[in-house]
Image (cartoon, rainbow, N blue to C red):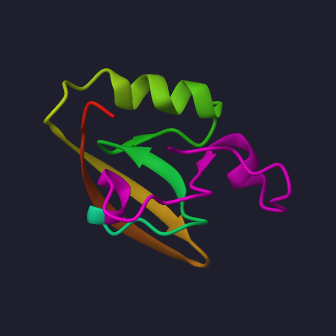
Amino acid sequence: VPAADPRSRSPRARRSSQFSVIDRGGAADRAGIHSGDVILTVEGADVTKLTPMGVLFVIGQHPIGSTVHLGLGRGAQTVAASLVLSAQ
């Protein structure tokens, strides 16, 4: 579950959502998401100005079982992840 990390020095991370813990075998792990990744886009829409709850709301608008395409900030890189939503 994405959680804002208040210790992050990146302004982008504070505005958006940063993954702090990835459950082994969970949906984020299966999508290749790493601890520290920051959600930048959801289905191509910029979410960097949303609060973490706002980002979760946007993701939650998709039905369980659907694939949500995320753009992630990982250090200086931008990577893509396809997250299959589960009921957990």
Q: Residue at x 19, y 24 (%)?
A: 63
Magenta stretch prevailing secondary structure: loop
Quarter of the figure with residue 29: bottom left
- Looking at the image, the residue that sits furthest to the bottom is 76
Lateral position of residue 53 relative to residue 24, left or right: right
**Number of marks in picture:** 0
Q: Position of residue 51 (x, y in %)?
A: 65, 30
Q: Nearer the viewer, residue 45 or 28?
A: 28
Q: Nearer the viewer, residue 81 or 85?
A: 85
Rendered-image quadrant of the C terminus: top left
Tell me, yes or no, whether the highlighted magenta stretch contains residue 36: no
Q: Nearer the viewer, residue 40 or 32?
A: 32
Q: Position of residue 42 (x, y in %)?
A: 37, 42
Quarter of the figure with residue 53: top right
Q: Residue at x 69, y 53 (%)?
A: 13
Q: Position of residue 20 (x, y in %)?
A: 62, 57
Q: Position of residue 17 (x, y in %)?
A: 60, 45
Lateral position of residue 63 relative to residue 56, left or right: left
Q: Residue at x 31, y 20 (%)?
A: 61
Quarter of the figure with residue 59: top left
* Magenta region: 1-29
Q: Residue at x 43, y 47 (%)?
A: 41
70 shown above or below 76: above
